[in-house]
Amino acid sequence: MNSNNYIISIDKASLAELPTITYPAAITVVDSAAEAHAALRALAKEKAVGFDTETKPSFHKGRTHKVALMQISTDERCFLFRLNKIGICAELKAFLENPAITKIGLSVHDDFTVLRRSGDIEPRGFVDLQDTVKRFSISDISLQKIYAIIFGGRISKTQRLTNWEAAELTPAQQAYAALDAWACLKIYRYLESGAFDPLASPYRHLRPEKATAGE
């Protein structure tokens, strides 16, 4: 059976039926120069990390904000860098530009665009999951759907439009932010390990053009 005839995607109804997952690891909020130094010293030992950012939502046309939060996750811990408080220090800039550490995110070019509002940054060593999943016939491009297809769990998005520049991040905000970065790393490791079998996925469908042609 030709795998090129198929795509893997999940519809909203099927997604809604899946159990909601909770963030399983530790969280460190980084809101001082000293904490950033300690976090980056730990992250420098990693070969691959998950990556994501959060920006305060704008409900007014033409108004934009700088990145408020940058999440960098290992398997065991996610560091939440509160950029609205500490900015992008030289060490963090060097980390983002270090090609030796693989940083996995989703739609990372959108993150780069917003990050560049905070300074001259040339990110290197990044992998975009939207490109990775194409090799496995997955057509969905949202993190929520990609995670659901691979692991059968649902990532809640209830905190997405909250205020990421608040004086203190709530536990719910912290868990939401950490989960996205952690999930990027988990998905990447699983796909690259060869553990995911596209032909065995319950969400495999005949490509629309093939169905129309009667193939």
Image: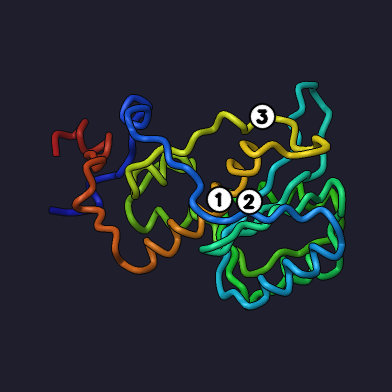
Residue 101 placed where, x, y %?
Answer: 62, 73
Circle 3 crowding by C-alpha within 10 Å: few under 14, some 14–19, many from 20: few
Label 2 and label 3: CA atoms lie apart by 15 Å
Q: In percent of the image, x 84 and y 58: which residue is there?
A: 88
Earlier-in-chain disc, 1 versus 3 = 1
Q: Nearer the viewer, mark 1 or mark 3?
A: 3
Label 1 and label 3: CA atoms lie apart by 18 Å
Q: Quadrant of residue 91?
A: bottom right
Vertical placement of residue 73 versus 170, above or below:
below
Secondary structure found at label 3: loop
Q: Which mark is residue 106?
A: 1
**Residue type of the residue flagged with mark 1:** Leu
According to the picture, the residue beneath numbered tag 3 turns out to be 161
Earlier-in-chain disc, 1 versus 2 = 2
**Colour pattern of the rendering:** rainbow
Secondary structure found at label 1: loop
**Residue type of the residue flagged with mark 2:** Asp
Contact, CB < 8 Å: mark 1 with mark 2?
yes
Earlier-in-chain disc, 2 versus 3 = 2
Name the side, left or right, on which 176 lies relative to 18.
Answer: right
Residue 41 placed where, x, y %?
Answer: 73, 74
Residue farthest to the top?
Answer: 60
According to the picture, the residue beneath numbered tag 2 turns out to be 52
